[in-house]
Amino acid sequence: MADPSHVPSAYPNDDIPRRDGATERLARMIRIPTVSAEFAARGPAPFEEFVALLAELYPRVHQTLELERITDLGLLYRWRGVSDAPPVVLMAHYDVVPADALDGWTHRPFDGVIHDGWVHGRGALDDKGPLLVIMEAVEDLLATSFTPARDVYLSFGGNEETFGDAAKAIAQTMRERGVVPWLVVDEGGAVVDAPLPFVSGRAAMIGVSEKGVATFRIETRGEGGHASAPHGPTAIGRIARALDRLGPRTFRARMPGTIARMLRSFAERSDGAPRLLLRTLATLRPVTAQVFALLGGEPAALMRTTIAATMAEGGSAANVLPSRASATLNVRILPGETVAGSLRRIRRRIRDPKVSVEVLEGNDPSPESPVDGPEFAAVAGAARAAYPDAVPAPYIMMQASDARHFHRFSPAVYRFAPLAMSSAQRAAIHGVDERVDVESLARGRDFHVALITRLTDDA
């Protein structure tokens, strides 16, 4: 058993003193444009600058933890615990998507402006803010000479946004060494207000699975010619017709078991008519799937595989009929379905032998991690410590994360960024005016302090 002197018997947040200046540290991170999509053009300099900045900002972490570079962009820190129990892995990524100040940002995306209780800039939420609160917690705990009950690994990748191999290589390295994590926590869900249209209050949404993601290309070829004398369906016309057939109902609505459990979690928090409604929705799964599908947006995406045309190509001049046209589809696959099944479904819906469909890349959905074991309880308990008014609830993450690489050998993988995010903030991820609340950063740090200090070696 672990030495009980290493683990506080209770967790009041004030027990672990925090350093001042976390907001400025995040602002400095944001000012380094670690845009992985521009890596080929910019080279490694911004990424190496970011790694050096981490060493400057978190001296105790770099004095105490063992740091290993896995590929050029993978950082793996090991914090040795007092036992050899299976470790915990805390994940984040330090690359970001592109941002153009001309798109209408209130503050330039890489200026790292701190204003009116917010830190503004690309990466504030995705994913430098979540990375920062991990490092803040570890640095503060090291200042008290704390040692965790089991090893804690920090896994940071620099090419998550481009589906790079940094996190995959880290997971593979740990697997080859026989290290099977007891718990993995990566970005994903957050603390949100009114998570569904008929649910009030705040919820800590903990992703127990994530949708698969695939990129498809549809393409057709036809006879070119002069635009003054079109004849029959043009290549662009065929692609347009195919896209029109790939509407929201391309894939049927279906409620996964995780969503039923999510609704039951909300019901426990409610009373009166809302409680009865939520219990009914959790029970009548086929009906609820159709109701959510009609709501559209995030509720609909929880119930079906989604498909979106994201790029189109065809034509070389305004007066020339193109001989070729294509479109790119982004497909997010619901657990229980597959990339191969999605391909067959899309071909059936298009119903045009002259339109080819191919998979450019794809990953099947991850399996669902348990919600009734000590691992989920550890994440939920830490969420309650940091956000006492938020009910922890499981859900399915609709985006892809680096955590999927650990699902191949680790049974308990969860996706939760311990930051409060409004619907407007979530829309700003990969969009305009990304920002994080200063108070939320403090609570995010408290989440990780609670998670780490409550670890034992007997679960």
Image: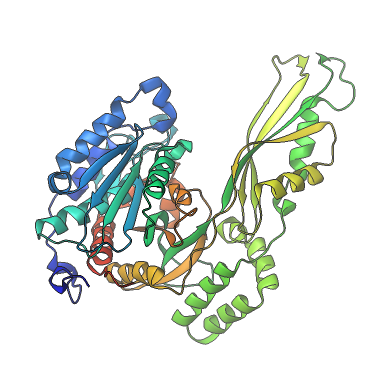
The residue closer to the viewer here, 350 or 88, is 88
Most extreme residue toward the left is: 144
Tell me which residue sits at (65%, 53%) in the image: 305
Measuring from the top left, give residue 400's x and y in whole percent: 50, 48
The residue closer to the viewer here, 147 or 201, is 147
Tell me which residue sits at (12%, 54%) in the image: 19
Measuring from the top left, give residue 307's x and y in whole percent: 65, 46
Tell me which residue sits at (53%, 73%) in the image: 261
Residue 8, by quadrant, is: bottom left
Vertical position of residue 327 compared to residue 223: above or below: below
Looking at the rendering, in which quadrant would you find the C terminus?
bottom left
The residue closer to the viewer here, 336 or 281, is 336
Residue 28, by quadrant, is: top left
Q: Is residue 280 left or right of residue 4?
A: right
Measuring from the top left, give residue 354's x and y in whole percent: 84, 31
Q: In this view, does 142 lie to the left or right of 89?
A: left
Residue 420 visible in rendering: no
